Image (spheres, rainbow, N blue to C red):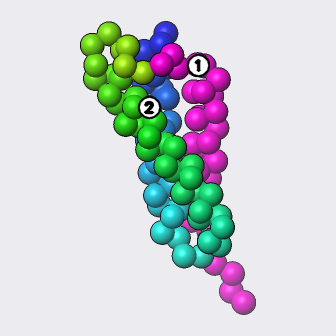
Amino acid sequence: MIVVLGVLNLAFCVLIAICGLWLLVDASLPRSRRALIGVVTCGAVVNVVALSEALGSIGFLAHAFVWPSEAVVNFGTALLMLRECRPRKMSMA
């Protein structure tokens, strides 16, 4: 169970990191919003590195236990980040 949660958590964190990096270069977003997205992206990148190392190590002991709630939170964050990355309709003003 812990390996499955670890793999799911890794997948969600990779998705968050990719979406976050995509949104960081979006000049149409306000600077404060991009700063907050940057903080979330940094956390996701740290998780990607830690979980990748843990999954690559023998016995999966390099990383602390992955709580189910952590995987659920990362799933929700990934969905929100994907929603933000969708193309926006341009207003014809």
The mark that comes first in sequence, 1 or 2, is 2
**What range of the chain is rendered magenta?**
64-93
Residue 84 rendering spot, x and y as whole percentages: 61, 57
Left-right relation of 50 to 65:
left
Q: Quadrant of residue 92?
A: bottom right
Magenta stretch: helix, strand or loop mostly: helix
Left-right relation of 84 to 5:
right
Labels 1 and 2 touching (C-beta < 8 A): no
Left-right relation of 62 to 21:
left
Q: Residue at x 40, y 29 (%)?
A: 51
In the rendered image of this protein, does residue 5 appear above or below residue 47?
above
The residue identified by callout 1 is 67
Mark 2: give few (<14), some (14-19) or many (20+) Cα within 10 Å.
many
Q: Residue at x 28, y 19 (%)?
A: 57
Q: Amino acid at mark 1?
A: Trp
The residue identified by callout 2 is 10
Give the foreground label among 1 and 2. 1
SS under mark 1: loop
In the rendered image of this protein, does residue 22 appear above or below residue 45?
below
**Which residue of the protein is positioned furthest toward the bottom in this rendering?**
93
Q: Residue at x 48, y 13 (%)?
A: 2
